[in-house]
Amino acid sequence: RAAVSAKESLVGLTREEMADALAGIGVPERQLRMRGQQLWHWLYVRGVSSFDDMFNISKDLRATLAKHFTIARPEIVEEQISNDGTRKWLFRFPPRGAGRPVEIETVYIPEEGRGTLCISSQVGCTLTCSFCHTGTQKLVRNLTAEEILAQLLTARDRLGDFPDRDTPDGAIVPAEGRKVSNIVMMGMGEPLYNFEAVKKEVVIASDGDGLWLSKRRRTLSTSGVVPEIFRTGDEIGVMLAISLHAPDDDLRDLLVPINKKYPLEQLIDACRNYPGLSNARRITFEYVMLKDVN
């Protein structure tokens, strides 16, 4: 099979990385900050997925950007829409290196006063929780910060959740005025086994000059990777959800096998010491009810 030559995506880069990328294609140093801010605005405020739509950037620079970079969305393999407005997407991402294209699921759940997007952090999973379909799949790879962020961007595209792109002064829309107001990382994979990419995506999505999704509107669900729980509160600063499902170690060992490595006593202790724990940053405990089991 012929090697796939992929352009670098500007989606998922930090501001510093974006400046480095622009410098690498010859943008003068004195323009880096301005050009970086323009790109940031188009990507995360206006939600464009083509350089051609960036009409306040010169035609020559747009052509240079398109030659070296991509800002394309993932392929939508399937979209299912329920009567209540719930949507489920199957996204396909292009190969990384010598790998193959991968597919992941993302779900949007509309509720009164808010809309929640459930995003994935891995393709497959190493954990084998007995009630989870993803647990029956082998881990293929971690998602990149770009791929995690692309789920949000594409969902907002499909929901019409970006400002009117024909209006030059499209304003930043606060979370309260959006269809996607909250994000839960409860999709495919264990996010704390992909810590750095998850952290990077949260930093970009919570930027006040871009997508502006407050960390207080983000919930990260973990099966109980105890060593990373404190880091999550300290370095990422989002709400925490614990995939509990059993009241004692014997049963949880069967339902959530990671409990054998990090038993309940360690898990609950990590929760008690979660940085910033308060009424404003609470921990949710998830409990799937299994008949005659728990």
Image (tube, rainbow, N blue to C red):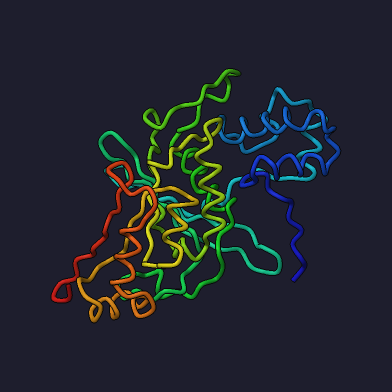
Give x and y (percent) for residue 163.
50, 26
Give x and y (percent) for residue 194.
52, 62
The part of the image, by quadrant, that contains residue 52 is top right
The quarter of the image holding the C terminus is bottom left
Give x and y (percent) for residue 66.
76, 40
Give x and y (percent) for residue 180.
40, 38
**Residue farthest along the left direction in this orientation:** 292
The quarter of the image holding the N terminus is bottom right
Residue 97 in sight from this viewpoint: yes
Give the vertical position of 291 relative to 196 (above or below). below
Q: Which one is in front, 246 or 143? A: 246
Q: Which one is in front, 195 or 22? A: 195
Q: Is residue 63 left or right of residue 250?
A: right
Name the residue: 58% across, 52% down: 145
Q: Which one is in front, 44 or 269? A: 269
The part of the image, by quadrant, that contains residue 27 is top right
Q: Is residue 28 left or right of residue 274?
A: right
Give the vertical position of 65 relative to 91 (above or below). above
Give the vertical position of 140 relative to 150 (above or below). below
Name the residue: 80% across, 32% down: 61
